[in-house]
Image (tube, rainbow, N blue to C red):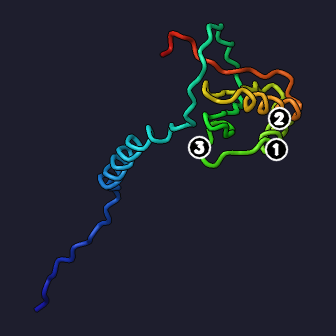
Amino acid sequence: MRKITKTRKHRQMNEINVVPYIDVMLVLLVIFMVTAPLLTEGVKVDLPQASAKPIESSESIPFVVHVNAAGEYFVNQETGESVNLNAIQVKAAATMRAKPATPFLVRGDANVDFDAVIQAMVALQKAGVEDIGLVTRSPADK
């Protein structure tokens, strides 16, 4: 006598289980939501007050030299180490060659010695920058 055996064929599952991917995505979303506000730190500068009209915004990102209360120079909100005037001049010249329409601004602290702001403007002028703007805040922005 012959035994009849049933053989089961195991079919492969052709669906992707996305539940673990959704869990990972939600964890990453929470991490990015917590760390995003921490990335917006900049150089602490107490701007002088002036009642001037705001300049028209342009399409290009401005080149900003920050001068903090201690007279240290920073370029474009780099919060690492301060830079010297020669480094500002080199970076400004490179920016002028790459994008000549870039607006150049000096953002000096209200308590800084005026000479430090002037030296930053002279460094930009030596790099070939003709139009330099000063950043202030309006009295209503307290």
**Which of marks 2 and 3 precedes in the sequence?**
3
| Nearer the camera: disc 3 or disc 2 | 2
Q: Secondary structure at mark 1?
A: helix
Q: Which mark is residue 86?
A: 1
The answer to whether marks 1 and 2 mark residues whose Cβ atoms lie closer than 8 Å is yes
Which residue: 75% across, 27% down? Answer: 104
* Marks 3/2: CA–CA distance: 20 Å
Q: Residue at x 67, y 17 (%)?
A: 57
Residue topped by disc 3 = 79
Determine whether label 3 and label 1 are within 8 Å by CB: no
Which residue is at a point 66% across and 33% down the rendered structure image?
Answer: 66
Residue 55 x/y as whole percent: 68, 13
Which amino acid type is marked by label 2? Ala
Mark 2 lies on a secondary structure that is helix
Q: Which mark is residue 123?
A: 2
Q: Amino acid at mark 1?
A: Asn
Give amino acid for label 3: Thr
Say whether disc 3 or disc 1 marks the residue closer to the N-terminus. Answer: 3
Q: Nearer the viewer, residue 42 or 100?
A: 42
